[in-house]
Every structure is written in C-alpha cells, then in structure tokens.
Image (tube, rainbow, N blue to C red):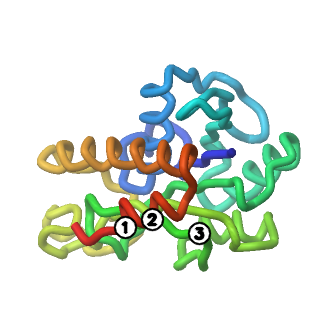
Amino acid sequence: MLIVGLGNPGTKYKDTRHNIGFMAVDSLAEANVVKLNKRGFQSVWAKGHIAGKEVVLLKPQTFMNLSGEAVQGISDYFHIEPKDILVIYDDIDLEFGSLRIRLSGSSGGHRGMESIIEQLGTNDFPRIRLGIGRPGKQGQGSRVKGQEDVADYVLSPFQADEKDLLRQTLKTVKEAVEVIVKNGIEKAMNKFNKKP
C-alpha cells in the first residue's frame, strides 16, 4: 500500500493547515519507526511496516497542485494499483478535528487531489479527508481576526489553542490507517466516519 500525505515543501509551509497531510505521514512514520529519508519520484519517501504489512509512505515535494506527478511516478515504479493508494489531505468543508474516510470520489476542489486524479486517470482510490474548517467560522479552525480569504487561511499555521486538537486528530489518523492496513477501508469507515 502507498500512503500519501499532501502538503507543500519547505519550512515556510511546514506547520500550515494545508500541510496536515504531511503531518499525518510524519506522525505515521514516527509511530512506526520509519525514517522518511529517501529522495526520488519528486518526493521524500520510505518503505516500512504498519500493522505488520509493508507500506510506502510518501510526501510529494512538487507543491500541492502537481502532487499527482509524484504519486504516479512511485506507484508506477512499485506497481501499486490505485485501489492500494491511500491519500491523506486537508478539507476546509469539514470541521477542524474531524475526518472522513472514503473509497473514492471527486477532488472536492482540492488542487492536490485534482492532480492525482488527472495523473492516475481515475478517482477510484481511498482517501482520508482531515477537517481544517473554514475561515471565520466559530469552532472551525482559525479565529484570527480578518482572516477570511480561503487561500490565506489554508496557508496559515494552526493557532496555539488548536494544537491539542491537532495532536488528537493525528493520533486518530494513525489509528484509522492501522485499521485500513490491517482490516480494510470499510471497517475503518464504519469505525471512524462518525459525527464528532
């Protein structure tokens, strides 16, 4: 299985909402003692084991809107079918701290997902959408005054008072990925796709 976290490379974007997919892959790597130290396929990646199964963890370094190039390259190299590619990414339409697991679907306007769908030629691959909320909505992400532009919002860092919920979200993602790898996506959907 290929597990892809979406984000933008570089320290400028490291702790931003749009990089929660990168954070999830980093968290998975740390929990499973996998060193993300290989470079190639326009990515940082590593092979390792989660729940006793071999996986490839991937963080594309192409910037978000070209993520599909990295995913296509490594999936071709390792002969990984789209159904065995799990993509983890941010979703402004979900409340911060929530997640949704899906077998397939549209990009929902997410540029990284658009790129992956275009490069793979299908939207039939599983994904975990991580809620980051929308700007200006109470209880949904940032409460920074005047921060209404979506592009600015997704590229803004998580606030100090959001760090605990962010840590809990990443812990839940780790648990969900373990269930997906061990028992399949439908079991994970049944367990984790509950309303918060």
Asked whether the residues under the numbered discs 1 and 2 touch, taking CB atoms below 8 Å apart as contact, a structural biologist would say: yes
Disc 1 element: loop
Crowdedness of circle 3 by 10 Å Cα count: few (<14), some, many (20+)? Answer: some
Side of 35 relative to 166 (left or right): right
Mark 1–mark 2 distance (CA, rounded to whole Å): 5 Å
Mark 3–mark 2 distance (CA, rounded to whole Å): 9 Å
Please name the amino acid that badge 3 sits on: Leu
Asked whether the residues under the numbered discs 3 and 2 touch, taking CB atoms below 8 Å apart as contact, a structural biologist would say: yes
Crowdedness of circle 2 by 10 Å Cα count: few (<14), some, many (20+)? Answer: some
Nearest to N terminus: mark 3 or mark 1: 3
Disc 3 element: loop
Pinpoint residue 102: horizontal percent, then vertical percent: 52, 69
The quarter of the rendered structure image containing the N terminus is top right
Asked whether the residues under the numbered discs 3 and 1 touch, taking CB atoms below 8 Å apart as contact, a structural biologist would say: no
> How many numbered discs sit on the rendered protein?
3
The quarter of the rendered structure image containing the C terminus is bottom left
Residue at the disc numbered 3: 103
Side of 19 relative to 162 (left or right): right
Disc 2 element: helix
Residue at the disc numbered 2: 189
Nearest to N terminus: mark 3 or mark 2: 3
Q: In the image, is residue 92 above or below residue 13?
A: below
